[in-house]
Image (spheres, rainbow, N blue to C red):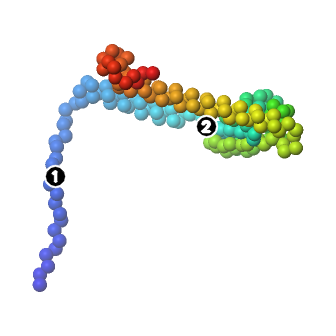
Amino acid sequence: MTSNPPQPMTLPMTFARRSTAAPSRAGRAFLAALAATAALAAIGGCASEPRGALLTYETTPLGATVYENGVALGVAPVTKAYPPVAGSADIRTPDVTAVWPSGAKSQPFFTILHVGDDRVATLVRPINAPNLAMDQANADKVAASNAADAQRRKDDAMRDLARMSGRCQAQMSGTGVKGAIDDCK
């Protein structure tokens, strides 16, 4: 019995001849722009500074003013960017406290962040501080305000998307169909 060795499988292929002509003026301009963009991206990437770390301060209940070394950062939640420390991968935050409308004050807080961190810290109202009902009522107002702000941002984003639609662009230029749905509200 004679066995034939397996034959390689062949697939039909087409080959195109590569042009040896010089690129057109438009092609050269495109290649120059592409090279410039790549060079700027490389330079920008090498020259960028380390970004430090981010820490978002939240409070329980909502609505306390956050202070860093006695200076108000704002009503929580507050996000603070901490720059990197030369020669160290760690960043020690300054002391932070939260003060509620009732006058209740949290214990001083600090933490150690690593370069590149994006963390959240929650400052808690002392349990034995008086006037909890006042702070809780304030927290309810802050939550309602935050929800209204979020809805407003969502509505603005939806309106901006609608205005970028082709149909809206046609309506604004006067070439759109009259009586069609108005996307430009």
Labelled disc at residue 50:
2
Q: Point out the image quarter for the C terminus.
A: top left
Point 88% across, 44% down: residue:
128
Which mark identifies residue 13? 1
The answer to which of marks 1 and 2 sits earlier in the sequence is: 1
Measured as percent of width and height from the top left, residue 114 is found at 67, 45
On screen, residue 42 versus residue 100, left or right, reads left
The answer to which of 78 and 102 lies nearer the viewer is 102
Q: Is residue 98 visible?
A: no
Q: Quadrant of residue 32?
A: top left
Looking at the rendering, in which quadrant would you find the N terminus? bottom left
The location of residue 31, given as percent across then percent down, is 32, 30
Which label is found at residue 122?
A: none
Image vertical order of residue 22 relative to residue 87, above or below: above
Q: Residue at x 32, y 28 (%)?
A: 30
- Looking at this view, is 42 or 141 the one in front? 141
**Which residue lies at the image location 81% right of the left edge and 37% below the top edge?**
133
Image quarter for residue 177?
top left
Could you tell me the amino acid type at mark 1?
Met
Q: Which x, y percent locates residue 51? A: 61, 36
- Neighbor class of circle 1 (other Cα within 10 Å; few <14, some 14-19, many 20+) is few
Circle 1: element type: loop
In the image, 11: left or right of 78?
Answer: left
